[in-house]
Image (tube, rainbow, N blue to C red):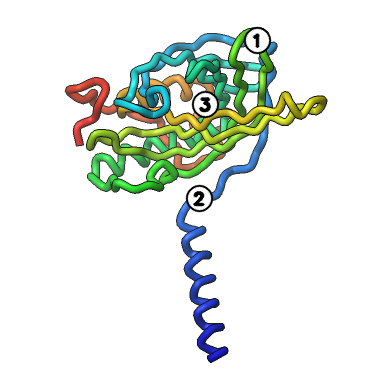
């Protein structure tokens, strides 16, 4: 009886380990960006976000893209549920974004996109840096966080997604000032994602990157509905 019990435990552990290896682990490489550093507006991209409390259809939103040359970081600046967010991308993170989009387009063209609760993790997880604030004179929280790259189906149409996980700000002086950011998902059509990729490519030279898989992205043909891809 004990032998059977041990066998069950071993099988359960084996299944758990295999399940954990299904998805790529996060690239734990923290970095920081100073909000007082020089910054350049490089463009604006259109995307979709969830409505307040996640009710109703996706809502279109324009996001400002900034470049911080001192830290070589790109920033997506946007408003969501009363907060202003600055979502920062390091060079390595941008390269992973470009690779993820390339793989997504390949899966899209091969009609190999599957509806799954884990599809937002399909193309891996990278490390980002987040600064968020409700009002100008309230606490400006900041922390590193994970960013998942994948896709999600909405109304039977797939969207390439940036899934911003929660960030934990721990104040060194007062526990009352600690903050946890919201989890935010950005939804892109292929044409919208290609626009962001084109901006991210501006400070990346092929051959000098750390990702051998990266190739210069090509903008897919826009769908009939600019806010939805036909699939």
Check contact, mark 3 vs mark 2: CB within 8 A.
Answer: no
Which residue corresponds to the image point at 66% horizontal and 29% vertical from the top-left?
143
Query: Mark 1 and mark 2: span between their CA atoms?
Result: 34 Å
Q: Nearer the viewer, mark 1 or mark 2?
A: 2
Which residue corresponds to the image point at 46% horizontal and 34% vertical from the top-left?
163
> Where residue 47 sits in the image (x, y, percent)?
37, 21
Q: Secondary structure at mark 2?
A: loop
Query: Mark 3 and mark 2: span between their CA atoms?
Result: 24 Å
Q: Residue furthest right?
A: 173
The answer to whether residue 156 is above or below residue 68 is below
Quadrant position of residue 208: top right
Q: Count how many numbered circles sit on residues in the image.
A: 3
Q: Nearer the viewer, mark 3 or mark 2?
A: 2
Q: Earlier in the sequence, mark 3 or mark 2?
A: 2
64 or 7, nearer to the observer: 7
- The crowd level at tag 3 (other Cα within 10 Å; few <14, some 14-19, many 20+) is some
30 or 4, nearer to the observer: 4
Q: Nearer the viewer, mark 3 or mark 1?
A: 1
Q: Residue furthest left?
A: 224
Q: Earlier in the sequence, mark 1 or mark 2?
A: 2
Residue that label 2 marks: 24
> Where residue 65 sits in the image (x, y, percent)?
49, 15
Q: Say left or right for 67 vs 170.
A: left
- Which mark, by number, is residue 204? 3
Q: Say left or right for 88 vs 34.
A: left
Q: Earlier in the sequence, mark 3 or mark 1?
A: 1
Residue that label 1 marks: 38
What is the quadrant of the C terminus in the image?
A: top left
Query: Mark 3 and mark 1: span between their CA atoms?
Result: 19 Å
> Where residue 165 sits in the image (x, y, percent)?
53, 35
- The crowd level at tag 2 (other Cα within 10 Å; few <14, some 14-19, many 20+) is some
């Amino acid at each position: 009886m004990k032998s059977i019990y041990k066998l069950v435990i071993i099988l359960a552990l084996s299944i758990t380990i295999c399940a954990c290896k299904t998805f790529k682990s996060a690239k734990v490489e923290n970095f920081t960006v100073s909000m007082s550093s020089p910054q350049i507006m490089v463009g604006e991209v259109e995307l979709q976000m969830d409505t307040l409390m996640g009710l109703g259809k996706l809502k279109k939103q324009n996001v400002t893209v900034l470049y911080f040359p001192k830290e070589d970081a790109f920033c997506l600046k946007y408003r969501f549920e009363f907060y202003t967010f600055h979502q920062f991308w390091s060079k390595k993170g941008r390269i992973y974004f470009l690779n993820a989009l390339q793989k997504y387009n390949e899966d899209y063209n091969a009609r190999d996109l599957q509806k799954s609760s884990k599809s937002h993790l399909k193309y891996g997880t990278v490390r980002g840096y987040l600064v968020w604030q409700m009002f100008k004179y309230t606490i400006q929280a900041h922390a590193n966080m994970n960013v998942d790259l994948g896709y999600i189906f909405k109304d039977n149409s797939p969207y390439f997604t940036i899934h911003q996980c929660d960030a934990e700000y721990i104040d060194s002086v007062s526990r009352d000032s600690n903050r946890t950011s919201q989890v935010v998902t950005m939804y892109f059509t292929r044409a919208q994602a290609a626009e962001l990729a084109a901006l991210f490519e501006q400070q990346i030279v092929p051959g000098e990157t750390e990702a051998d898989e990266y190739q210069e992205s090509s903008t897919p043909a826009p769908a009939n509905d600019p806010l939805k891809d036909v699939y």
